[in-house]
């Protein structure tokens, strides 16, 4: 689900999982970080800043993990493309849709626990609730352009 489409980048809402409320991917079709122009970097900075604003305002996010790994494309022999994972993190419990969400491993690498089905963060939201989170973010997202 696309939250925003810009000149180079698009912001994709992680509708497949909201293990971290507001999780999104900022993606472009360039193969390597060294292919990015100065303008591409400026646009990326604006998008990351706006995602932070939206998640702080809507969900009271505390801080954010922002990463570009690209390992899977090479591992799986796929065409790589530059993309960043935007992961809001929450020190305090969030009440959303009459559910209590807690960032179980706040302050730790967001993927550290993902391989353990016993320790990983659980996505507590239904498909319909994930769509509502998307709609909330889409309604608030504004680059002022």
Image: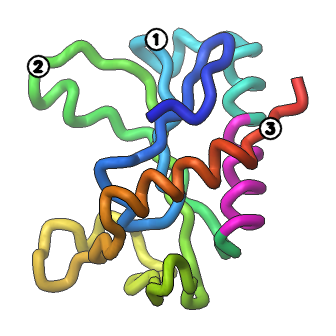
Q: Are marks 3 and 1 in contact (CB under 8 Å)?
A: no
Q: Nearer the viewer, residue 20 or 119?
A: 20
Position in image of residue 83 (x %, y %): 45, 30
The local crowd at label 1, few if under 14, some if 14 to 19, many if 20 or more residues have their Cα within 10 Å, is some
Q: Which residue is mark 3?
A: 142
Which quarter shows the C terminus? top right
In the image, taking residue 140 as reference, residue 125 lies left or right, namely: left
Q: Residue at x 62, y 29 (%)?
A: 4
**Magenta span dominant secondary structure:** helix
Q: Residue at x 21, y 26 (%)?
A: 73
Per the rendered image, the range of residues in magenta is 47-58
Of circles 2 and 3, the one toward us is: 3
Mark 1 to mark 2 CA distance (whole Å): 16 Å
In the image, taking residue 77 as reference, residue 106 lies left or right, namely: right
Q: Residue 30 got which mark?
A: 1
Q: Residue 77 got which mark?
A: 2
Mark 3 to mark 1 CA distance (whole Å): 24 Å
């Amino acid at each position: 689900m696309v939250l925003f489409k810009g000149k180079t980048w698009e912001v994709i809402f992680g509708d497949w999982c909201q293990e971290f409320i507001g999780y999104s991917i900022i993606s472009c079709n360039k193969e390597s970080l060294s292919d990015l122009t100065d303008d591409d970097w400026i646009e990326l900075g604006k998008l990351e800043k706006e995602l932070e604003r939206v998640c702080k305002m809507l969900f009271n996010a505390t801080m954010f993990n922002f990463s570009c790994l690209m390992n899977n494309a090479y591992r799986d022999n796929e065409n790589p493309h530059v993309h960043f994972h935007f992961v809001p993190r929450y020190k305090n419990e969030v009440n959303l849709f009459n559910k209590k969400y807690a960032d179980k491993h706040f302050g730790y690498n967001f993927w550290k626990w993902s391989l353990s089905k016993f320790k990983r963060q659980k996505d507590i939201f239904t498909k319909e609730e994930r769509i509502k989170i998307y709609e909330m973010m889409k309604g608030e997202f504004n680059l002022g352009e």
